[in-house]
Amino acid sequence: MKKTKTKTKTKTKTTTTTKEVANKCSVQFLLNDQKVSIEAPSNITLLDLLRNQLGVKSPKCGCDVGDCGACTVILDGESIRSCLVLAPEVHGRKVVTLEGIMKKSEGEMSELQRYFLNKNSFQCGFCAPGIIVAATDLLEKNPHPTREEIVEGLSGNLCRCTGYTPIIDAVIDYIKQKS
Amino acid sequence: MEFSFIGKPAVRLDGKEKVTAAARYVDDLDFGANLLYAAVVESPHAYATIKSIDTSKAEKAPGVVKVITGKDFPYKFGMYMQDRYIFAQEKVRFVGEQVAAVIACDAISAERAAKLVKVNYDVLKPVLKVEEALTIEGCNHSTSEPILIHPELKNYEHVPWFFPRPESNIAHIRKIRTGDMDKGWAEADHIFTDTYTVPRYAHCAIEVHAAVGLYDFSGRLTLWTASQSPHTQRHLFAEALAPLGVAHKDVRVITPFVGGGFGGKAGVSMEILAAALATTVRGNPVKVLWNRAQEFYNTYQRQGVLAQIKVGVKNDGTIIALEQNLYWDAGAYVEYGANVVNAAGLSASGPYRIPNLKIDSYCVYTNLPPGGPYRGFGYSEFLFGLESHFAEIAKKLKIDQIEFRRKNCIIEGDRLAYGGKMNPNGLQEAIERVASEIKWGEEEKTTTKAHAKNIRTGKGISLFWKAPAMPPNASSSAFIKFNEDGSINILVSAMEIGQGFLTVMAQIAAEILSIPIEKIRVETPDTDRNPYEWQTVASHITWGTGSAVLKAAEDMREQIFCLIERALGKERKDLYLKAEGVRSHSDETFHLLYKDFVISGIPMEDGTFRGGPILGRGSFMPEYTSAKSNPETGQGGKPNVHYTVGAAGIVIEVDTDTGKVTIPKVVMAVDAGRVLNPDLVKGQITGGVLQGLATALYEDMRFDDKGRLLNPSFTDYKIPTTLDIPQEIVPVMLEVPGHDGPFGARGIGEHTMIPIAPMLANAIEDALGIRIKSLPLTAEKIALHFQLHSHKLIANDNHSSL
Ligand code: FES
Ligand code: FES
């Protein structure tokens, strides 16, 4: 995930002045393969829209400014930080969260998730949804990444607990078993 | 001992919830349409008198329900010393301190209205360094009388083991005196003196602090908090709000999963706001959610320390005397931080046998954010100076680093600084294992850019120790209940903060009751339902809560045997538990499964039943500890239950041009007493090592000359990413069982980051011949030191000012 790509987007949320009443906009998009149509304030982020308007709680807020990756979701096939995207921007587009990844595996954990589970990859688990989405996206684009590529690919997701090794090792084990 | 579940890896009990995002953290919970949001008005000054607060404009702003100021809550609170108010009263004492709060229908309205609250201040000159807060011998500071931050210090209530100095900025001094210092200095062949400094650090759990409070019309106060301390919170909420008529039984704290703690979510910090504010909007839940910046400047921070160390040694390297003055920058309120100062003072000899000791650990008020618990609880801080200093001494005496530590390390039965005896431990073995793992004494070949002229290699080691810092009566308890199918629920109030505590509790019960882990559920606590636990801190949970769970499981076993004896006439001595049921030594055919009687009872011939639901109960308190001691010498009590010890070693490569450090290998040997789950111990090691490396290499809280934190974001306060991990971390787990604790286990969670900074500093010295005496050891600092050193611009001893 390239952090810089999405980080340049200006966030109007904080610049709205007191007098302005937040404009509502209607957003239609595909969320985890399901059509969603919702009226939302036009200055909220995709993260806010998902969590607080749509009740999709897997993306977490660790910083709200694009630094931590806890809010990672897939937008039109690219993993992005949902705290840096405004809700109206997703109109007509496709958003996939961790829930969507499990939906694809018939409501079960994906194979990759199973590896994270069996490796005890996570501790507090707060970073887990973001990291699993980022790793899923990475493997979609590059099914046989090297260790360096995995490290690089997950470098935008902060985890304070694990020291990352058990996370990286789970991805490597998963790839090994695949090939 | 043969175990079925202890010492075996297991898939974490909470693993599935966490990888599927079913796990819920406070901000994931739904509170309904009447949820209100609070935003705080923060002090822009480090030290100022509040002249007036005008809330009129904010009150009229759209969406606003209420504006609350210090007038509404003139109540104090605090963990070990009541020096803190819910909202600032006459004075503000750090930048970011809460002065008022706005409650509104949505978060944005609350934030906007908070900006409309007008506070008039008389700005005072802040005290931003310990050197300014007191008169310290040997420190450069102004000669004028220090400004007092808490003139009312003498009136503050505190625990009996604190010794504040009224009319000064010293909230507590922990003194240790053993042996005879004069004799020690006289007997020493050499005396080495130096000063080391450690800055403040932030915990940086990825989940920010969050709390929701609801005060309903029946008088019930419920809090949902991201906390390591639900029962302590309940107690402090009830105490602080007692003037409103709130009692313990009316307060309920529910703690769902916590997204990382590291000490930052221990005790009570911002959560008091949710409790207080909820009482002003009865019937409406109100949410207080910190943003990342607030997470940096208005929760606990790890305290900075200035350490003056003087050591006397014999020619053969025997340490004979140690004098250490630790000046802790404890911040504006020390209700929790003063105990860090205390714990560090008690143990500042490090894991060494030193006959003559003089330690003064000063808790110093400054106008920086409140200090508090952080993984390591003061030990990482003092160990940086101590282990760096010992390495220097060994080098000057031309004694091998490992040999120096072999010679002086503490062993079982040695006298501790406060008088007790050192517990059985594997420190010597740890030293040997680390030495052999990093091939101590052998030349390291550069692994990456072999032969490059600007790459130097080095090795460093450090010993470590830590005791749980707890009040002598800190306790844990557990209930275990059977379900119809023979599965069990364990009810405890320790917190799963990532360490894997739920899993370990299940393993302990599984071992006693012979029930597979898959049939055990352990949930995060609710103080209404789950029995008492002091707090999830001090790495004491495996040991303390684990002991309570063990007792509860044994209690169930007792009840089961009693029942079977009574109902079936079997002799209880003949019975044992196996494969989810009861067996008999003498009758191999006897196998009564739990599911057939633990709820439904045992049917008798006459159609009646014997028994009833089996419920286990266990309590644990270490009845052998005491904090009572002579304030002038620290002698007389037994403040610590035991020490967990270990050693760590590192191999590094340093680029002499850029100062960049790469790390081929780290070895961490820790004596866990008993390893209950090797996978989880390993997890603590890989996580703790990286967290330690980050504090050693680049993390650093920077304040400006007005006391404002300059880097309250992950952009400016860098924490490690996947790109920053060492190439290899070798965990070494040792087992010298303790006299108590489940199967002899001790905690190891905090310990894994404690030796990292001095170990790294020692490796840098080994590689480049430079001794850096202030953390962090940034690339810039290393390169600069090296340049100056190699151009002989400074003597090696004399560049701590950098
Ligand atoms: S919450 Fe979006 S990157 Fe941190
Ligand atoms: S597991 Fe805690 S932040 Fe990653």
Image (tube, coloured by chain):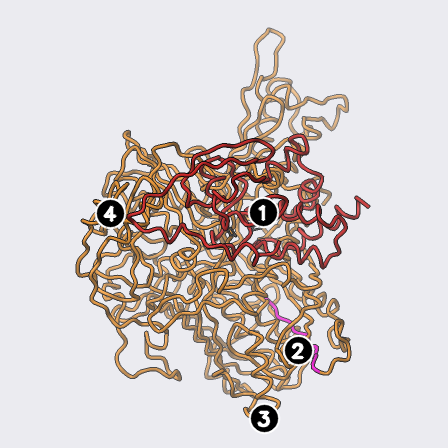
Chain colours: A red, B orange
| Residue type at the position of mark 1 | Gly
Q: Earlier in the sequence, mark 3 or mark 2?
A: 2
Q: Quadrant of residue B463?
A: bottom right
- The answer to whether residue B542 is seen in the rendering is no
- Where, quadrant-wise, is the N terminus of chain B in this rendering? top right
Q: Mark 4 falls on what kind of element? A: strand
Is the residue indicated by label 1 positioned so its CB lies within 8 Å of ligand 1?
yes
Q: Which mark is residue A149?
A: none
Q: Chain of mark 1?
A: A
- Which residue corresponds to the image point at 23% horizontal and 61% vertical from the top-left? B91
Residue holding disc 3: B792
Residue at left 64%, top 21%? B595
Query: Does residue B459 belong to the magenta stretch?
Result: yes
**What residue sits right under mark 2 in the picture?**
B655
Provide residue B289's location: percent of width, then percent of height. Answer: 40, 47
B523 sits left or right of A142 in the view: left
Give the residue pinned by disc 1. A130
Kind of residue sitting beneath label 4: Ile
The range drawn in magenta is B454-464
For disc 4, the marked residue is B68
Q: Is residue B796 above or below residue B406?
A: below
Residue located at (60% from left, 92% from top)? B791
In terms of secondary structure, where does tag 2 sit?
A: strand
Nearer to us: label 3 or label 2: 2
Q: Is residue A17 visible?
A: yes
Q: Chain of mark 2?
A: B
